[in-house]
Amino acid sequence: MAKAKRKIIVGNWKMAPDTLVEAKQIFTTVARGVSRLKRTQAAVCPPFLFFHSLISGYTGTRVGFGVQDIFYEESGAYTGEVSPVAVKRMGGTYAIVGHSERRLLGETNAIVAKKTAAALKAGLTPIICIGERTRDNEGKYLGEIKEQLLESLGKLQRPSLSSVIIAYEPIWAIGASSAMSPRDMHEMRIYIQKVLTDSFGKDVAALVRVLYGGSVDGSNAGSIVGESEVDGLLVGRQSLTGEGFMAILKAVESL
Ligand code: PGA
């Protein structure tokens, strides 16, 4: 099974915090903490409002920057949207696309596929979120995952596929009181790999990184990454304090 050289831990700050002062506080703790990490890559996805200030004030290289969404056009009259080209030029590396909270607002697999293609064209690494709303005993959710995954990838050519990151986030585990078990995540890891292998071939599928997301914290991060063989984590609430995010990074680093 594919293994990225370094595990990647991505913080999705969502619509928080409220002030730039707080954003800087969170970021400063992370920026200081990562200097001791050797095997773990950290990335933060702050709100667009704070993105420029944080990235332009950062002189280090160990924290990657991403955005929580992008538009699928490079330029033009699109009120309220953000161009992937502008994100790249500003120093961004990642773009989360298709987060379940955006899908809930009406984002379809077809839109996610357009955003995925636009991110890649701009030189950003798309982090494509997929995940079932609920689980059933007949395994229907697996069909849902397969459809989301393949449709969100759209008509990507094989070479581009190796630059894509998939974040598997079961919706029932997001913002919940506990994460999915490492064992169940391991099964999903294998399933996602199989779907990709069937469609794109083993060699390309092996290069696609798969993250887990949903109620990750400092106490479960190590076992999830260690036992499920994911390539990293997408973290919500616990990325909103520098200490919480660093606890996850340290847990993964010490594996
Ligand atoms: P959570 O959010 O870590 O707060 O559950 C995860 C996510 O939505 O990416």
Image: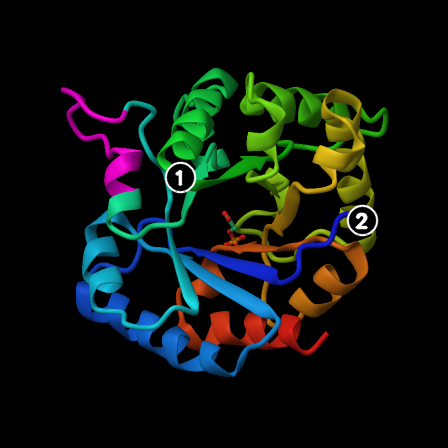
Q: Quadrant of residue 29?
A: bottom left
Q: Give the residue at x 72% y 60%.
A: 224
Q: Which of marks 1 and 2 is in front?
A: 1
Q: In this view, does 104 lie above or below 55?
A: above
Q: Which amino acid does label 2 sit on?
A: His
Q: Pointer 2: what residue?
A: 186
**Do we see residue 5 in this rendering?**
yes
Q: Which of 31 and 117 is in front in this view?
A: 117
Q: Is residue 82 on the magenta stretch?
A: yes
- Residue 213 screen position, x and y as percent: 59, 50
**Do we see residue 104 in this rendering?**
no
- Residue 5 screen position, x and y as percent: 66, 60
Q: Pointer 1: what residue?
A: 123
Q: Give the residue at x 29% y 53%.
A: 91
Under tag 1, what secondary structure?
loop
Categorize mark 1 by other alpha carbons within 10 Å: few (<14), some (14-19), many (20+). Answer: some
